[in-house]
Amino acid sequence: MERRTLANRWQSERWEPVEIVPDSGEAGTRLLMKDRERAQWLHPGFAIELHRDEAEGYYLNLTTPTPYVFVMWRMEEGLAAPKVVTVSYHEAGRMMDGGEQVDGVPMPPGLMAWVDEFVRTHYRPEPKKQRIRPPSFKGAKRD
């Protein structure tokens, strides 16, 4: 997570996730860097799990121009703390609908390949249904 200092009279800083990195196994949040304009913290311990019932959400994410890893975070004691990390477009949408702060970080290529393999194995788009015209429209003439 990164905090940037803003020259703005309404808001003094902005928080956002900036990168997803593989977990090194070290526990505990730690400060990575700090200068006058920004500071970055590493929050280890998150795992991305893929579930078959979310396969459409993964597919929709992968088919965008820039697939994202979505990070839901909250402010706690003056620091932005990530709570959930997901690659499902649907899950991120549900969290935003619930009023949570969710931001996206471009998905790393290795993670993208793993999610793509899962989607190819488990996602089957529903066949398009032919639209049935109501009886009231059958035989109607247009001018």
Image: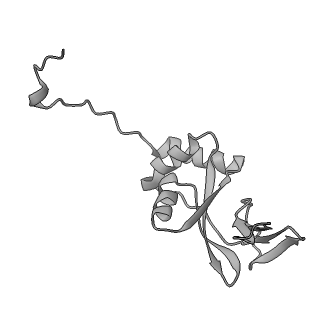
User: Looking at the image, is 69 positioned above or below residue 15?
Assistant: above
Q: Nearer the viewer, residue 12 or 100?
A: 12
**Residue drawn at (87%, 72%), measured in percent from left and top?**
34
Circle count: 0
User: Looking at the image, is 65 positioned above or below residue 43?
Assistant: above
Q: Would residue 143 be found to the left or right of residue 55 on screen?
A: left
Q: Quadrant of the C terminus?
A: top left
**In the image as oriented, which residue stretches furthest toward the right?**
35
**In the image as oriented, which residue stretches furthest toward the bottom?**
77
Q: Quadrant of the N terminus?
A: bottom right
Residue 74: % across, % down: 61, 74
Q: Nearer the viewer, residue 12 or 132?
A: 12
**Residue drawn at (53%, 57%), measured in percent from left and top?**
50
Residue 71: % across, % down: 62, 63
User: Looking at the image, is 65 positioned above or below residue 37?
Assistant: above
**In the image as oriented, which residue stretches furthest toward the top?**
143
Residue 23: % across, % down: 73, 66
Q: Quadrant of residue 11?
A: bottom right
Q: Quadrant of residue 136?
A: top left
**Residue drawn at (45%, 62%), measured in percent from left and top?**
97
Residue 83: % across, % down: 60, 72
**Residue drawn at (49%, 59%), measured in percent from left and top?**
91
Q: Quadrant of residue 85?
A: bottom right
Q: How is the image coloured?
A: one colour
User: Looking at the image, is 124 positioned above or below residue 99?
Assistant: above
